[in-house]
Image (tube, rainbow, N blue to C red):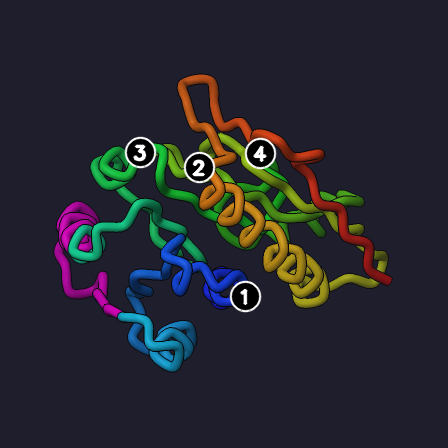
């Protein structure tokens, strides 16, 4: 989230009337991103999922909170909730997520541990469109990092996170500039040389 906000700030989009971060919303009151957002003068909201009897009830209230800001696009960043089909359909073709693996490998949680257990040599992250099926929406951009012999979950996760801070702002940039086309065939990125970002770390 911080990387997305800083990308908007770096490009001075709000002053130019191009784009702004309307709000940062979390289901955890102690999320570090909320404090950062407030420091930047961005509206924040907290909705605790434990206050609701069902996932559907939580998502219905979450949708009302989001819609109050009238966003053109929604970016999920560390929002560790499985969303209902009703919510994802409401934001169809305008909601994105970043997942810490090279999808379709290692969906769900604990992706770095799964990568180490599987013995893969390449790991990374994926920005994808959000659909009703978990971690299954059309892929926009992926990163790749080597898995080193002495890696732990923490060291591998840190290496992947560094690339997440590159590829997620890039996808935001494409969206703002009208270079993303999301149709029945998937997501196409127009007028760019590549849809992959490779980062090598010692």
Q: Tag 4: Cα neighbours inside 10 Å, few (<14), some, or many (≥20)?
A: few
How far, Cα to Cα, is label 1 from label 3? Answer: 28 Å
Query: In the rendered view, does 67 fall on the left or right side of 2?
Result: left
Q: Nearer the viewer, mark 1 or mark 3?
A: 1
Magenta segment, which residues?
44-64
Secondary structure under tag 1 reads helix
Residue 129 numbered mark, or none: 2
Residue 10 numbered mark, or none: 1
Q: Earlier in the sequence, mark 3 or mark 2?
A: 3
Q: Which residue is mark 3?
A: 92
Q: Main secondary structure of the magenta part?
A: helix
Residue displayed at 34% across by 53% down: 81
Q: Which residue is mark 4?
A: 104
Q: Which of the 4 image quarters holds residue 38?
A: bottom left
Q: Taking the image as drawn, is residue 30 in sight?
A: yes
Q: Residue 81 lies in magenta, yes or no?
A: no
């Amino acid at each position: 989230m911080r990387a997305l906000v800083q990308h908007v700030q770096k490009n001075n989009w709000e002053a130019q009337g191009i784009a702004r971060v309307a709000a940062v919303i979390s289901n955890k009151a102690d999320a570090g991103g909320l404090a950062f957002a407030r420091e930047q003068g961005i509206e924040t909201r907290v909705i605790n999922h434990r206050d609701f009897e069902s996932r559907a009830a939580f998502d219905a209230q979450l949708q009302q909170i989001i819609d109050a800001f009238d966003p053109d696009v929604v970016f999920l960043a560390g929002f560790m909730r499985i969303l209902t089909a009703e919510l994802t359909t409401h934001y169809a073709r305008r909601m994105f997520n970043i997942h810490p693996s090279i999808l379709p490998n290692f969906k769900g949680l604990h992706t770095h541990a799964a990568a180490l257990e599987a013995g893969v040599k390449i790991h990374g992250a994926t920005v994808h469109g959000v659909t009703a099926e978990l971690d299954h929406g059309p892929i926009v951009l992926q990163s790749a990092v080597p898995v080193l012999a002495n890696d732990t979950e923490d060291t591998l996760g840190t290496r992947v996170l560094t690339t997440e801070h590159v590829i997620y702002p890039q996808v935001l940039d494409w969206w703002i500039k009208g270079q993303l086309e999301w149709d029945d065939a998937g997501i196409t990125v127009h007028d760019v040389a590549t849809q992959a970002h490779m980062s090598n770390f010692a």
